[in-house]
Image (cartoon, helix red, strand yellow):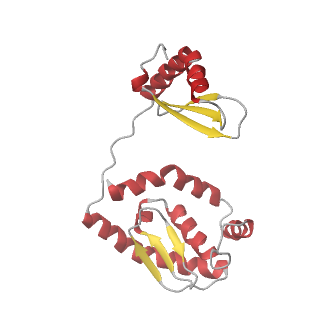
C-alpha cells in the first residue's frame, strides 16, 4: 500500500460495527481510526485507506500543528506528606461544621464523617449515612466545598443521581452547576497534586 505518509509512524486502528460504509477518523493523539462494516474484507479496507492517503497525511499534519500550538500546562507540584496532613487537619475542622450547617436545611441526619486522601472521589455517602470527604477539597473555593457537602447530604434522600436527587441539590444550592463545572474544569489539577 503506497502512500505519502510514513505508515510505520501512524497507528491505524480498525473498528468494525454494523455500519454500512467505511469511514476514517483522525484523533488528536494522531491515531487513525478506520470504521468498517463487519463483513468488509481486509483488502477493501487497505484499498480504502490507500485511496485516502493524501487526505490522511494532510489531516495528520494539521492535527500536529494544532497540538503544537496548544499551551502546555505547567508541571503539577505534588503535595508533601506534611502538606497533606495539614490539609486533612483543616478539613477535619472545617467540613463537619459545614455538614452540620447544611444537614437541617436538607432535612437529613448523618452518621460518621471521615476525611480521606482520595484519588477519584470528592465525597461519598454510605447506605448507613456515613460521609467521606476528600481532604483535597480544602484547595477548592468555599462554594465548591459546600456543593460537595450538600451533594453527599442529598444522597441521604436519594441514593442515585436521578432528577429527584438534583432537585434536592438545587433547593439548597440553585447555582450548583457552577460549582460542578469548577470541579470538572479544575478537579484533575487538584487530584494530580496527590500523585505528582
Q: Quadrant of residue 116?
A: bottom left
Q: Image point 58% across, 20% down: which residue?
A: 47
On screen, residue 58 versus residue 159, left or right, reads left
Above or below 184: residue 12: above
- Residue 32 position in % (x across, y down): 52, 30
Above or below 8: residue 81: below
- Residue 184 position in % (x across, y down): 54, 53
Decide which of 177, 2 is in the foreground and name it.
Answer: 2
Give the mark count. 0
Q: Image point 74% across, 65% down: which residue?
A: 163
Q: Quadrant of residue 72?
A: top left
- Residue 16 position in % (x across, y down): 62, 39
- Residue 8 position in % (x across, y down): 39, 25
Decide which of 143, 24 is in the foreground and name it.
Answer: 24
Q: Quadrant of residue 149?
A: bottom right
Above or below 30: residue 124: below
Above or below 136: residue 73: above
Q: Image point 41% across, 63% down: which residue?
A: 136
Amino acid at each position: 500500500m503506497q502512500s505519502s505518509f510514513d505508515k510505520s509512524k501512524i497507528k491505524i486502528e480498525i473498528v468494525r460495527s454494523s455500519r454500512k460504509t467505511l469511514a476514517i477518523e483522525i484523533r488528536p493523539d494522531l491515531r487513525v481510526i478506520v470504521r468498517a462494516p463487519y463483513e468488509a474484507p481486509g483488502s477493501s479496507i487497505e484499498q480504502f485507506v490507500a485511496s485516502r492517503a493524501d487526505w490522511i497525511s494532510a489531516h495528520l499534519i494539521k492535527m500536529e500543528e494544532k497540538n503544537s500550538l496548544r499551551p502546555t500546562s505547567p508541571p503539577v507540584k505534588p503535595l508533601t506528606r506534611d502538606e497533606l496532613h495539614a490539609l486533612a487537619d483543616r478539613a477535619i475542622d472545617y467540613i463537619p461544621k459545614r455538614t452540620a450547617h447544611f444537614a437541617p436545611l436538607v432535612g437529613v441526619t448523618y452518621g460518621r464523617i471521615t476525611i480521606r486522601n482520595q484519588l477519584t472521589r470528592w465525597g461519598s455517602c454510605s447506605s448507613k449515612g456515613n460521609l467521606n470527604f476528600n481532604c483535597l477539597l480544602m484547595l477548592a473555593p468555599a462554594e465548591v466545598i459546600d456543593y460537595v457537602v450538600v451533594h453527599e447530604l442529598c444522597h441521604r434522600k436519594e441514593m442515585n443521581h436521578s432528577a429527584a436527587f438534583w432537585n434536592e441539590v438545587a433547593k439548597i444550592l440553585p447555582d450548583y452547576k457552577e460549582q460542578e463545572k469548577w470541579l470538572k474544569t479544575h478537579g484533575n489539577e487538584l487530584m494530580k497534586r496527590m500523585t505528582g
